[in-house]
Amino acid sequence: MKNDEVKIKRKTLEDTSIQNKAHESLYETYPAKLICGVLYHDKFDQEAVLSDLEKKWGKIDFCSEVYPFSDSSTYYKSESGEKHHRIFVSFEGLVQPGNLPRIKNETIEMETSYGSRHDSLRRPVNLDPGLIMRGRLVLATTKDFSHRLYLGEGIYGEVTLLFKKKRIENLAWTYPDIKSGRYQEMLLAARAKYESDCLADPKWASANQS
């Protein structure tokens, strides 16, 4: 191969590399903090579920108080039994929002596994992963509706509530147990940790100021 041809080929490869890096930078998204709602049957081992979640996504840093979900709703009665509870947990570190569909599908696999171990309940554990992002909480769901956007892999995203400074603003479709304020302290603490984690990283700290 002639020298001129080598130079042209090398220049083409360099240009392609630069374009790829620019493309990656253009679509790199501000990170989020992973959370998960855990609804579980009264007799199911809550600690075992939380341990499984930590094996997948890392250490839990915040956990809400337990909400007696079945006392106020019969929505999950046929799947999760007469008596079930719900908590929300969050995980250390930051994640890319584009991972949410994959994470939701992982929780569906976990739910199926838990169901196979239970004699009478199809869904003794219901997992609802979501993201704390700048100004909002997004929960993942397989159900389409007017206020949800398709994210891919069969998963939709719902802006469930808004963060306004140091308070939470519910929306018309915010779930009743979340509206009750039972998880508010935990969600605000997780959001504060999310903001401090972003500010601790120079890359995202500068983006937050722009």
Image (spheres, rainbow, N blue to C red):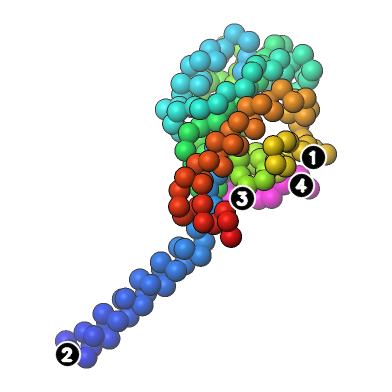
Q: Which sits earlier in the primary sequence, circle 2 or circle 3? A: 2
Return the residue at label 1.
171
Tell which circle, 4 or 1, labels the residue nearer the N-terminal end. Answer: 4
Q: Is residue 94 above or below residue 26?
A: above
SS under mark 2? loop
Name which residue type carries label 3: Leu
From this viewpoint, which residue is outermost toward the right?
A: 172
Residue designated by label 4: 147
Q: Which one is earlier in the sequence, the residue at label 2 or at label 1?
A: 2
Mark 1 is on which residue type? Leu
* Residue drawn where x is 79% and y is 18% of the image: 72
Label 3 and label 1: CA atoms lie apart by 21 Å
Look at the numbered discs 4 and 1 and tell me whether their residues touch, using CB distance below 8 Å.
yes
Q: Of residues 135 and 152, which is closer to you in this image?
A: 135
Q: Which mark is residue 2?
A: 2
Mark 4–mark 2 Cα distance, whole angstroms, equals 60 Å
Q: Nearer the viewer, mark 3 or mark 1?
A: 1
Q: Residues within 10 Å of mark 1 (few under 14, many from 20)?
A: few
User: Disc 3 designates what residue?
Assistant: 151
In the rendered structure, which disc, 3 or 1, sits on the residue that comes first in sequence?
A: 3
Q: Which residues are magenta?
A: 142-156
Give the Cα distance between marks 4 and 1.
11 Å
Look at the numbered discs 4 and 3 and tell me whether their residues touch, using CB distance below 8 Å. Answer: no
Residue 57 coordinates in the image, percent (x, y): 46, 33
Q: Is residue 207 magenta?
A: no
* Amino acid beneath label 4: His
